[in-house]
Amino acid sequence: MSEQPKALLPDDPSGFQPRTILWLITIVAVGLSLFQLYSAGIQQLGLFYQRSIHLALIMMLAFLLFPVFGSGRKRGIVGGIIDTAFFAGAVLTGFYLSFNLDAIIARAGFWNQTDIIVGCIAIVTVLEASRRAVGFGLTIIGVVFILYAMAGPRGALPWLGEYMPGILAHRGFTLERIVGQLYLGQEGLFGLPLGVAATFIFVFVLFGAFLEVTGAGKFFIDLAYAATGRQRGGPAKAAVIASAGMGSISGSAIANVVTTGAFTIPLMKRLGYRPAQAGGVEAAASTGGQIMPPLMGAGAFLIAEYTRVPYLEIVKVSIIPALLYFGTVYLFVHIIAIKQGMKGMAASELPSMREVMREGWHFLLPLVVLVYLLVMNMSPMRVGFYAVVSVVVVAVLRYLVWFFIIGPRQGHPVDWVKIRDMVLAGFRLLVQGLALGARNAVPVSMACAVAGIIVGVVGLTGLGLKFSSMMIALSGGNLVLALFLVIIASLILGMGLPVTAAYIVLIVLVGPALTAEFGIPLLIAHLVVFWYSQDSNVTPPVALAGFAGAAIAGAKPMETSFQAWKFAKGLYLIPLFMVFNPELIMGGPTHIIAWNVLIAICALAGFAAALEGYLFGPMGLVSRLLMIPATVGIFWPDPVIEVAGLATIVALLTLNWFMARRSAIPV
């Protein structure tokens, strides 16, 4: 019995976490998940109650999980004192607001000294928790924005305003005004980003965690292998399909690479893919999981809140672009398999589709429940609650059927000892799922909290309008150049920010210009920025998903990142297609949508063939060069040029097929 409690403790790969801390991590994590489930499905709480308690528990968990001097070192006396102080700060600042909410609202705008001091502690605590859970990049940006708010003749740091360029200059704000905006109001720490993280995102992260601990990840991977394993490049194609399924619920491209890549990358290498290619395919496919409905990482919820478009509509309009992206990655994989003369895997090495479905069909039921409730227009938060409950219920029912019916028939009789062990095992699995969901939510919630600081400062200083003016001036009013500037900005931000934070910062800064000045519909502007925010996962010099794939594949990080960047080219082209062919997102006559899908498929296929120099057979240099203006023509907002571009691509691909067939006929 002494080993039973130990199974409830989280893994500690470093070996430096004391047993007491591991117990605290489990208790806080389980408490956080139970609080979220209670507020999602039983009793919804007010805005400040929900968000302040969520932030308090998330920060407490962050300080327990990530010691001040790094996870690879023991805390020591000094580290223990610092961590205890920040832990106390998380408790104080998180619960101060909920315990004193009525009094704080009553003195709105006339804060007392305690309010300001606690607010200052809250901002420092959030920034430190972000440094530990997310990294230095986001923390530094948060500090820069706070300093920017202080800079100006009436600000707390008037001398700093002298260094502000003319268009960025503002009057400056006092410490009290900034704290009131960021901690005591609805536009800072407890604004929309954290609100989405504390409601929709958390319950769906918890849903993904329960799928993981109950074995759904292996089911989806086996399903992908059974479907594609016999084809050329089967493991790589399985990686694309499995990543599409797992990436949508994982909330992190890097986590997706590590999860599915552990299975797919070694098999790709064994089949003949170079290590860098194998890691690149997995990184590109895992990044695509973040744009794949129904969950799209955290993006669908944020886009729905910002645009006031129903969540279900976001899901529906994102299906075709996501399929186009994965189709492009799939095509790259197929081209490489043909070029290198690869064969499929032997049937004896693959799982049977019938066997996979027989063993894991029940994992599809929670997804059916999720989609059905969304179609019924239920609140996404409540949908997430029932999705989590359905996973638990399905897992319990399946095990009970095996334990009491199938097991005895196979020679495993039931007795009280086995029943007791079954109940304990089920309890441990429940605790494991609750704890894993909370731990997985820490980075995204901390990113959203700091993003709230950035959004609060932008609203306070009017920086969004200033940035829009700069963008219009630099682009000269040219839409393509403006979109190119968004790509550059997303790439730079992505080097230090997670995707969710990069999206929030970018849309706050460039969104007004894209919609008001360039006439892009609001929903398309958000989708474009969200897609471009993904590119930092696969674009050198900082490509975190590419680096994770390289580590598993045993390849060079930069070479793997370049391969991932090449396979993920749909991230750049498909948003452009949304802008110049808005019917794909906004809807329209059926024949117009069908035409747009057709030309998008041809453009992406032609571009992939030109980039690889191969489709049905080797493609000559002239054909590859002609493919570039033809692809540009597809995106040109002129029907004649569009048709000419499509005709050129079809002619070049037909010529490639004819030449490949002729070379294959023996003389």
Image (cartoon, rainbow, N blue to C red):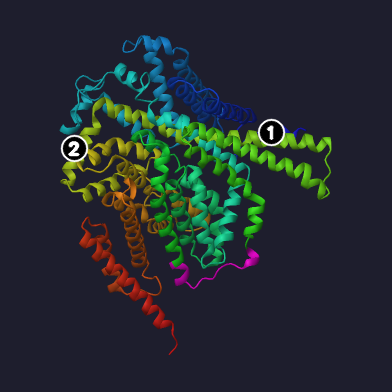
- Pointer 2 local density, CA inside 10 Å: few below 14, some 14–19, many at least 20: some
Say whether residue 73 is visible.
Answer: no
Q: Label 1 amino acid?
A: Phe
Where in the figure is residue 341, as x and y percent of width and height?
A: 49, 73
Q: From what the image shows, is residue 634 above or below residue 527? A: below
Q: Is residue 4 left or right of residue 293?
A: right
Q: Label 2 amino acid?
A: Ser
Nearer to the camera, 92 or 39: 39
Q: Which residues are magenta?
A: 335-349
Q: Is residue 517 left or right of residue 199?
A: left
> Which residue is found at the position 21% from the left and 43% from the top?
518
Is 328 part of what is drawn in magenta?
no
Q: Secondary structure at mark 2?
A: helix
Q: Is residue 422 left or right of residue 303?
A: right
The residue singled out by tag 1 in the image is 427
Which quadrant holds the N terminus?
A: top right
Is 348 part of what is drawn in magenta?
yes
Where in the figure is residue 102, as x and y percent of width and height?
A: 42, 11
The residue singled out by tag 2 in the image is 469
Number of numbered callouts drawn: 2
Which quadrant holds the C terminus?
A: bottom left
